[in-house]
Image: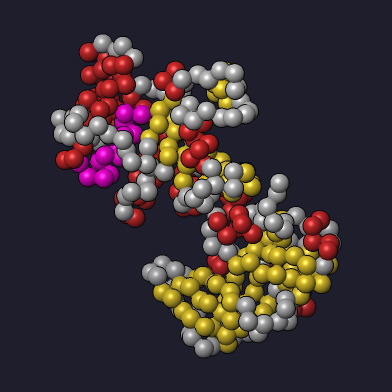
Amino acid sequence: MVSLIGPSGCGKTTTLRIIAGLETPTSGRVIGHGNTLSDGARVIRPELREMGMVFQTYALWPHMTVFRNISYGLRRKGYDTAQIAARVSEVLGMMNMSDHADRYPGQLSGGQQQRVALARAIASRPEILLFDEPLSNLDAVLREQMRFEIRSLQQELGMTSVYVTHSQEEALALSDMIVVMKDGKIIQRGAPREIYDTPRNAFVAGFIGLTNIIDLRDVAVSADRIEGRLPGGGTLAAGGGSFDHARGGRTSVSIRPSEITIAAGELPVPENGINVLTGTVRDVVFTGGVIDYFVNLPGGKDLRVQTVPPVRAERGQTVTLAFDIARTIALEPGDPA
């Protein structure tokens, strides 16, 4: 399962449509199943690519029952009546929709319509399954439920899948590989944990999960870390990421809110004060299982810190923050070409 993720207009849906054969690329090649599907000179038609697609709008025919929606592609491929009935029954069972075969899309909830669209896509057993933001029209609870159902089904069927989304939660939960895109370019690709733990630059760090971006000056580089000063005072060291670009004296680092330790009193000061800062709590936000603290540093920079309950500091209180050097990531400047 490969997820293409990025802001609106970055090219992820266009890329998916090129893979599907719904758009003709102006250059380059598309290779699937070991065969060239598009090379500029010739283009294999979408219906011959052995792919199934789940659209953002579901694209169900409103005048057809669930059974007929799912069986449409099978009929077009020449399956006989018995084969169609068996295959539709099979995929409806997978979707827990066996009792809805005679209903029309307008009689179904959003989640049920999404299951029918998925059933239709897998009914012909395609070699590649394509998803174009399939959960964006669902409410938050149903979206989370469907996310796990799609992942479980994809693993059960063993279908190579490409999944387009703008949701970092979906990408992290579903994917074996994440491809982060911006302005039609791939900025970074890798396993979800790799993308999350070691983002390449500030764009990736901010797009995949919550993070604090901190600018450093007077940066010194060693074999296993960089060290630099904050504008308002204090020294931070970063042990993750790439260090070569930091030799110019200034750089930025990323630290996830959950990786910062917060205490109302003093913390043990490691390594001569490196990665220990003091600040004032500007706001505390309780969201159930997580508490957000917005801490103002002496230089005016706000940092976001997340912990689990109970509350560890109150608004207006002076706190001490400590950063794990290994989890503080040095970032490359700008976007790679």
Residue 173 on the magenta segment: no
User: Where is residue 31, by image quadrant?
Assistant: top right
Residue 119 on the magenta segment: yes
Residue shown at 22%/45% (left/top)?
A: 109
* In this rendering, position of residue 70 left or right of residue 158: left
Name the one closer to the observer, 203 or 22: 22
Q: Is residue 37 above or below residue 239?
A: above
Residue shown at 48%/85% (left/top)?
A: 314
Residue shown at 60%/70% (left/top)?
A: 260
Q: Is residue 3 above or below residue 38?
A: below
Name the one closer to the observer, 48 or 176: 48
Residue shown at 55%/56% (left/top)?
A: 207
* The residue stretch that appears in magenta: 108-121
Q: Position of residue 239 (x, y in %)?
A: 73, 61
Name the one closer to the observer, 86 or 35: 35
Name the one closer to the observer, 57 or 114: 57
* In this rendering, position of residue 62 left or right of residue 203: left
Q: Position of residue 158 (x, y in %)?
A: 45, 28
* In this rendering, position of residue 298 left or right of residue 117: right
Q: Is residue 129 above or below residue 336?
A: above
Q: Position of residue 56 (x, y in %)?
A: 37, 41
Q: Is residue 273 above or below residue 54?
A: below
Mark yes or no: residue 20 visible: no
Q: Position of residue 55 (x, y in %)?
A: 37, 37
Q: Main secondary structure of the magenta part?
A: helix
Mark yes or no: residue 222 visible: yes
